[in-house]
Image (cartoon, rainbow, N blue to C red):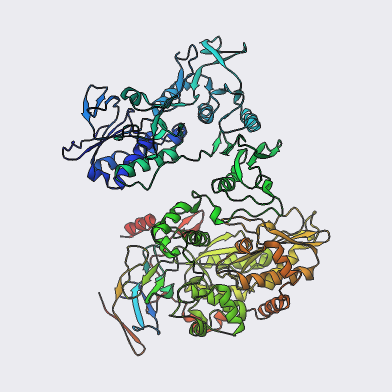
């Protein structure tokens, strides 16, 4: 591949030798900083392809093509006047005349030169290493050759059991070969793992039918008897194999630097300073060929940092420098989790070690801590990398370890300390999965002047997809602002300089009954979509008025305003309450008949009820009139309120049930069904310890025991699962309800807007012990008030749909148009699996075309 | 519905203009729902928050605050109990 851009004479000439990931990143950085306006840029690559993603090279064997792995198709270069030549090997630098020679014989001059020549695979000089059917694993061409060979043979062997070797072994296995790994060192991944970790990994890999030979030196490779090769080992044994793949480490590709007399390390590598300049100030070197502080960095991230530093320096910005990089790694090799952090080998003077090993589920974890036990120095993980992020944070940020530091590598058990807060989330943590926004992206946005959640949303798009990350996003933004020293406003919005908790107290103490009077007394302006529903919810929590009362209606979010859940096409879903999931056949038939009559898509929900989709605004009152006539009540699926109490059948039917979970579930659902809370609340009741109702993943979970009920609180499923905390055991019915009353009301009183109980608990100072103190020991003297408030809510329950149907004024709002009886023509359904669903844009066009 | 177009009418008695008319079509959520959004007063500007993905549209101009996109708006007048909307 070659570009057509001509060389311009009046700009200085920047030449980049090497077009791997790092060389490409350098060009990107230069372009991003406007360097292509200053320099004429020429790029040479030895390979036939422009830069591609070598980190994911193995995916070439699992369906990705060269185009998928490509980092550019040349457009970026063409658009910015960068000349590029692939298949072009630079063979000589004449530093005196500033000339480069190419293998083709051509030569050209440079003003600034960047060597991003990368590395080459080290092939141990074993006699026979150049035989046919021997390969290395670095380029797309290598992989093509391996694939071709693998088609005709059955056995493959990788020489080298390091990170790349195991990756290559995985590839051979995926090509269907009987695979072996031969490692010279006494264990696998000798750089990253300690002896025990290596041996656990070996066990796991052997469990996957890969033969592993450690501590094994190959003497020579000769013709095989049953296979193409025979590898003779130093101990006299041998291995027959058809294909050999050398992956015994990398060496810096530094021949060009050596030829031109640049300073080099004793064992190779081009010596660079913090701005990646070599001993010749007009020549930079970046990536795996560069030697910083006598060290080669064989990972892509440090290479990118070097690229950034070099590009900056070249263009006069010295704010970015390369000062080493953390080489901690986490990866999945042959399906096995492996992680290594910092001083994995416990080589620091005086360090102490914690080790956890589980031979049953095959996992091994080691923590290396400082002599005083306060800091984490390193860690090894094999079998389960879920511990990695937290450990890495402790290591990178030198955070003081918690008192029971070993808990960081022990399996989660009750009473374990909570994970680190948002400030401890790694920069790479994905906050918004819809728009793939990481914590780092948010941090960058804040640094660049986005000082509110709204601004950050505008810049990064985080939180504008499904919106499920809103709470987490706010925490991260607040945390970033705090880190910058910006005072974080806990104000709910621009209209109230108060937190939700403040507003709750005002409403209660000053007996404020409407948004208008609260705004008049304590707020400013006219309100917005943040404070209106929040205050609406507080008013409902405290006074429990009908939510569509004239003074409240404009406060309600769409779902609350029309007492149904808006779907993507503007239609609604209808969810009647089915307490505990128990329903008579007669009522089930009513649901079916209504769904049939209005052609509604019907689905059983996760909360054991039935959701009817596709109702238009105008249909909602008609549908509800029928449901209420049949004895149904609103399910409040639209509200920030109790959703469902999931249940198993319990002792009435089940052979194992120890208590009547069904009755308890129905009673609880009926008791709390009207409660408006900061966010939705879900319950479950299980009839025995088998926990079929999954109560421990709910805000309130109840599990029957021989002695009564165990109460779990603040669990969550959803996007950030949390097991409920065991709050109290063996409770009788009365005490159980008393405790739930108090916990829920305390939550309603003190939580932030849209804060689930799980997040509330994680942020509650004093945590579970404090909540127990408040609820069980009445530490704050609040319990009576909490119970009275709940009693008020329970006593004043009304089915909002029933009230609405009796109110002609409220019904008026359920119209699509004020001046037209027709339907919304954009609401179009198609049939799928014998039910309706919204048509896609494409389908709508097709339908219009047909009609047209 | 005005000349076959869905118009979202907002009556905001606290505002100077009292009444606003913008298109009902939410170009981001791709549904006719803006009339069902919550009205908000942000930094002195009256807006509606889309009930689908919560972007704000300025009631007097139809401009979206978060994205570079605009919905149509109409001249509108309140005369007693009658609402008059100017054709485009």
- For residue A288, what is the image quadrant? top left
Please state, as top left, top right, bottom left or bottom right, where the N terminus of chain A lies in the image: top left
- Provide residue B42's location: percent of width, then percent of height: 40, 74
Is residue A119 placed above or below A352 in the rendered structure? above
Asked whether residue A251 appears in the rendered view, the answer is: yes
In this view, the residue in front, B44 or A318, is A318
Please state, as top left, top right, bottom left or bottom right, where the C terminus of chain A lies in the image: bottom left
Is residue A784 placed above or below A756 in the rendered structure? below
Q: Which residue is the extreme one toward the bottom?
A: B80
- For residue A385, what is the image quadrant? top right
- Provide residue A606's location: percent of width, then percent of height: 61, 58
In this view, the residue in front, A710 or A635, is A710
Q: Is residue A100 left or right of residue A469?
A: left
Asked whether residue A545 appears in the rendered view, the answer is: no
Is residue A450 placed above or below A671 in the rendered structure? above
Is residue A477 placed above or below A503 in the rendered structure? above
Residue at 62% x, 12% y: name it: A237
- Provide residue A623's location: percent of width, then percent of height: 54, 72
Count of marks overlaid on the render: 0
Q: Which residue is the extreme one toward the right?
A: A707
- Provide residue B75's location: percent of width, then percent of height: 28, 79
Residue at 72% x, 75% y: name it: A783
Residue at 61% x, 30% y: name it: A205
- For residue A118, what is the image quadrant? top left
In this view, the residue in front, A658 or A609, is A658
């Amino acid at each position: 591949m070659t570009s057509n851009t001509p060389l311009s004479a009046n700009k200085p000439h920047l030449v980049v030798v090497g077009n791997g990931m790092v060389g490409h990143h350098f060009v990107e950085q230069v372009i991003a900083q406007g360097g292509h306006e200053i320099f004429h840029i020429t790029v040479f690559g030895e390979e036939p392809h422009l830069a591609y993603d070598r980190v994911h090279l193995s995916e070439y064997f699992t369906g990705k093509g060269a185009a998928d792995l490509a980092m550019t198709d040349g457009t970026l270069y063409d658009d910015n006047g960068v000349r590029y030549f692939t298949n072009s090997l630079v063979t000589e630098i004449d530093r005196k005349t500033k000339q480069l020679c190419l293998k083709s014989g051509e030569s050209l001059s440079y003003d600034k030169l960047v060597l991003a020549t990368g590395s080459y695979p080290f092939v141990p000089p074993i006699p026979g290493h150049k035989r046919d059917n021997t390969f290395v694993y670095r380029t797309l061409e290598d992989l093509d050759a391996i694939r071709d060979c693998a088609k005709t043979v059955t056995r493959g062997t990788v020489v080298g059991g390091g990170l790349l070797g195991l990756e290559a072994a995985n590839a051979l296995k995926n090509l269907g070969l009987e695979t072996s790994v031969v490692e010279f060192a006494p264990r696998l991944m000798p750089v990253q793992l300690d002896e025990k970790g290596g041996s656990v990994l070996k066990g796991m890999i052997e469990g996957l039918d890969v033969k592993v030979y450690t501590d094994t030196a190959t003497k020579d490779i000769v013709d095989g008897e049953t296979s193409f090769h025979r590898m003779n080992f130093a101990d006299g044994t041998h291995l027959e194999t058809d294909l050999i793949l050398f992956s015994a480490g990398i060496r810096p590709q530094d021949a060009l630097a050596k030829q031109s007399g640049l300073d080099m390390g004793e064992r190779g590598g081009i010596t660079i300073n913090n701005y990646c300049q070599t001993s010749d100030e007009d020549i930079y070197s970046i990536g795996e060929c560069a030697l910083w502080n006598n060290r080669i960095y064989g990972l892509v991230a440090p290479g990118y940092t070097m690229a950034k530093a070099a590009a900056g320096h070249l263009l006069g910005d010295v704010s970015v420098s390369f000062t080493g990089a953390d080489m901690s790694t986490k990866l999945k090799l042959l399906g096995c989790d492996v992680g290594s952090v910092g001083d994995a080998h416990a080589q620091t003077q005086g360090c102490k070690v914690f080790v956890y090993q589980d031979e049953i589920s095959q996992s091994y974890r080691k923590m290396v801590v400082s002599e005083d036990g306060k800091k984490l120095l390193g860690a090894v993980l094999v079998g389960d990398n879920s511990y990695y992020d937290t450990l890495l944070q402790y290591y990178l940020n030198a955070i003081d370890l918690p008192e029971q530091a070993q808990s960081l590598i022990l399996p989660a058990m009750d009473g374990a300390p909570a994970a680190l807060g948002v400030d401890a989330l790694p920069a790479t943590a994905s906050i918004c999965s819809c728009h793939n926004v990481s914590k780092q992206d948010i941090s960058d946005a804040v640094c660049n002047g986005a000082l509110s959640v709204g601004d950050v949303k505008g810049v990064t798009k985080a939180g504008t997809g499904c919106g499920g990350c809103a709470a987490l996003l706010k925490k991260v933004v607040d945390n970033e602002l705090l880190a910058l020293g910006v005072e974080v406003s806990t104000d709910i919005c621009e209209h109230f300089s108060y937190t939700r908790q403040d507003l709750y107290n005002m409403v209660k103490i000053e007996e404020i009954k409407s948004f208008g009077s609260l705004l008049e007394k304590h707020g400013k302006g006219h309100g917005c979509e943040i404070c209106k529903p929040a205050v609406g919810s507080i008013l409902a929590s405290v006074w429990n008025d009908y939510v569509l009362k004239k003074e409240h209606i404009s406060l309600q979010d769409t779902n609350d305003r029309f007492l149904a859940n808006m779907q993507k096409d503007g239609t609604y879903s209808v969810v009647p309450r089915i307490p505990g999931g128990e329903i008579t056949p007669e009522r089930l038939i009513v649901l079916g008949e209504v769904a049939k009559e209005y052609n509604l898509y019907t689905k059983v929900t996760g909360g054991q009820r039935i959701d009817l989709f596709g109702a238009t605004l105008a249909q909602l009152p008609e549908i509800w009139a029928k449901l209420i006539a049949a004895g149904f009540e609103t399910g409040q699926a639209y509200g920030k309120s109790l959703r469902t109490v999931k249940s198993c059948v319990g002792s009435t039917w089940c052979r194992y049930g120890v208590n009547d979970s069904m009755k308890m579930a129905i009673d609880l659902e009926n008791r709390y069904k009207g409660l408006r809370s900061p966010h939705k609340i879900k319950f479950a009741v299980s009839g025995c310890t088998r926990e079929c109702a999954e109560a421990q993943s709910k805000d309130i979970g109840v599990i029957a025991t021989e002695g009564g009920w165990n109460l779990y609180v603040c669990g969550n499923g959803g996007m950030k699962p949390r097991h409920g905390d065991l709050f109290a055991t063996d409770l009788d019915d009365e005490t159980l309800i008393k405790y739930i009353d108090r916990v829920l009301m305390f939550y309603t009183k003190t939580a932030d807007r849209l804060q689930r109980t799980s997040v509330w608990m994680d942020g509650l100072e004093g945590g579970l012990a404090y909540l127990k103190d408040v609820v069980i020991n009445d530490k704050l003297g609040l319990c009576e008030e909490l119970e009275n408030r709940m009693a008020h809510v329970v006593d004043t329950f009304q089915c909002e749909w029933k009230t609405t149907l009796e109110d002609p004024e409220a019904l008026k709002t359920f119209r699509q148009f004020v001046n037209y009886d027709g339907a919304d023509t954009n609401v179009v359904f198609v049939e799928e699996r014998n039910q309706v669903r919204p048509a896609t844009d494409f389908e709508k066009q097709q339908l219009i075309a047909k009609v047209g | 519905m005005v000349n076959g177009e869905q118009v979202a009418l907002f009556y905001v008695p606290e505002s100077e203009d009292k009444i606003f008319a913008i298109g009902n079509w939410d170009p981001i959520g791709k549904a006719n729902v803006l009339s069902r959004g919550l009205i908000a007063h942000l930094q002195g500007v009256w807006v509606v928050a889309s009930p689908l993905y919560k972007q704000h549209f300025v009631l007097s101009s139809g401009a979206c605050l978060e994205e570079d996109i605009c919905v149509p708006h109409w001249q509108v007048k309140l005369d007693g109990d009658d609402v008059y909307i100017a054709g485009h």
